[in-house]
Image: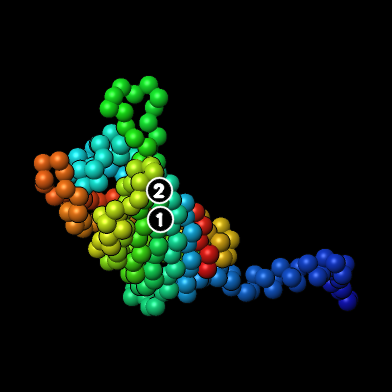
Amino acid sequence: MTSTMPRVCMRPPVACAAALLVLCASRPVAAQDPPPPIGPFVVDLHATVPTFPTDDSQLAASRGVLVTELPGVGLGLQAGAHFYLLKIKAVTVGVGAEFAASRARQMPAADTLPPAPRATEERFSTFAPQLSLNFGTGRGWSYLSGGIGVSNWAIVLEGEEPTAADTESLKTIDYGGGARWFAKKRLAFSLDVRFYAINPGTPYFVDAQGVPRGSPRTTLMIIGAGISVK
């Protein structure tokens, strides 16, 4: 007596799907692509908000203005370029340069009691090489950076010419940090908070008592936000 086993027939589409499932199951799951490294360079362009001192009597005396005539908060621009040279464990070391310029104006109110403050403009510009320590990947990273450069700090009454104190180059140490977030491959939103430690100025101005006055050692804070391109 001969026995026959039932034959299993599989339609071609079902057979192909089954074979594909077996093939996929037999292959290891592919790992995600590793994040790109930081760099090789980045260019920053930021709008900034500088915080100028408004209660510094020595600063006011160095320019022959009233304390109430110091402008205070202003607006400006900050631009920088950075190149990333090497990576040491979790830290990527970069070098570059930064330029920043900002301005603030004080316009006296019409109902101010005498002596009425005069219209004043305050300008600050600086340039410095930068050394940075960067943490993260090419998709986004934070950093600490600093440099030693020069700056010009002018406080000029409206209608008057800048004095020697306004055009003097002052040694300036800057330090701070920030972060860059790359929503696209080469374009990021970036934020920077920086402090500028400015050396005292030469006492060019002589007050009514015959005492020479120079601008004090001052630290300015400038907050910037904008874009980064790599």
In the image, residue 173 above or below residue 62: below
Q: Residues within 10 Å of mark 1 (few under 14, many from 20)?
A: some
Q: Amino acid at mark 1?
A: Ala
Q: What element does badge 2 sit on? A: strand
Q: Quarter holding the N terminus?
A: bottom right
Q: In the image, is 159 to the left or to the right of 189?
A: left
Disc 2 and disc 1 in contact, CB within 8 angstroms:
yes
Pick the front one: 11 or 128: 128
Q: Would residue 221 be seen by someone viewing this image from the given angle? A: no
Q: What element does badge 1 sit on? A: strand
Which circle marks residue 101 in the picture? 1
Q: Position of residue 30 (x, y in %)?
A: 59, 71
What's the coloring here? rainbow
Q: Residues within 10 Å of mark 2 (few under 14, many from 20)?
A: many
In the image, residue 206 above or below residue 28: above
Which circle marks residue 103 in the picture? 2
